Amino acid sequence: MNFEAVNDTIYPVVLCDSSHRVLVDCGYMGSLPKIEEALRENDIAPECITHIILTHHDHDHVGAAAAFKKKYPGVTVMASAIEAAYISGAAKSLRLEQAEQLQKSLPPEQQAFGEAFCSLLRRIEPVKIDCLLNAGDVLPFCGGCQVLATPGHTPGHISLYIPQLETIIPGDAMALINGKPVIANPQFTLDVEKAAASFERLMSLKARKIICYHGGPLNIN
Ligand SMILES: [Zn+2]
């Protein structure tokens, strides 16, 4: 599914099988109504979402997770142990650390923009992680959903691989720009070398479909 958010279309995925409805990544802060609308457009009742998997702690991926959990408390929220610390608010956001550092070197004309970004990051509502994921876990969704460690964009970033569907959900380990798979937002990537290795690892899986959160689906023949 997809919906437009902040002049930007994002592509959260829902994995559906006979007993699960798993939302992968959860939109910007304030976007719960858009998520609900996009789910209904795809014939999925929001209250039927059983799990939310958060690929990493960035505001465009976890922004609406707390609001979702509040409204639909039955949902199980999952993330890697490393990202869980930031998502739950136990540790200070690395993205905020990065933005505050950058703020010091911004030219005067960009100070207001930088401060607005920092303040946005400070307002991300933490959400408790119900289930910690580890690299190598195989989740019982769609015949087996593999959790892959794809660090770089953030240290605990995960991607999902569903062999039965020959599909990868890369979060921000990959983005699609003009139809080409690329490393997402290199300027925000916390470790570029690791991000490059993660990108190569995903490409080497030879999946037939990669659904990028930024850019949408890529079909590979
Ligand atoms: Zn993102």
Image (tube, rainbow, N blue to C red):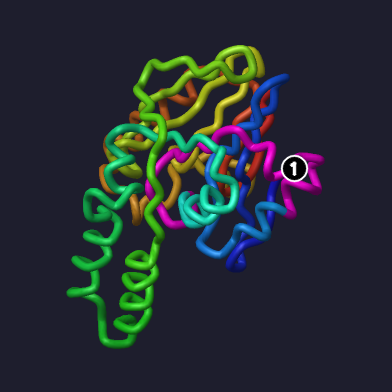
Residue 163 placement: quadrant: top right
**From the image, which quarter does the N terminus lie in?**
top right
Can residue 53 be found in the magenta stretch? yes
Is 47 positioned to the left or the right of 172 in the image? right
Q: Is mark 1 within 8 Å of ligand 1?
A: no
Judging from the image, what secondary structure is the residue with disc 1 in? loop
Picture residue at 30% right of the left edge, 33% below the top: 81
Picture residue at 49% right of the left edge, 39% below the top: 171
Is 23 positioned to the left or the right of 34 in the image? left
Picture residue at 32% right of the left edge, 75% below the top: 114
Camera-side residue of 70 and 150:
70
Is 126 positioned to the left or the right of 45 in the image? left
Label 1, residues with CA under 10 Å away: few <14, some 14-19, many ≥20: some
* Coordinates of residue 167 in the picture (x, y in percent): 61, 23
* Coordinates of residue 43 in the picture (x, y in percent): 81, 40
Picture residue at 24% right of the left edge, 59% below the top: 98
Residue extending farthest to the front is 73
Q: Which residue is mark 1?
A: 45
Camera-side residue of 35 and 161:
35
Camera-side residue of 218 and 23:
23
* Coordinates of residue 109 in the picture (x, y in percent): 33, 87
Is 69 positioned to the left or the right of 47 in the image? left
Residue extending farthest to the bottom is 108
Range shown magenta: 37-61
Can residue 105 be found in the magenta stretch? no
- The amino acid on which the numbered mark 1 sits, given as a three-letter code, is Ala
Q: Number of numbered discs present?
A: 1
* Coordinates of residue 74 in the picture (x, y in percent): 56, 38
**From the image, which quarter does the C terminus lie in?**
top right
Vertical side of 51 occupied by 63: above or below: below
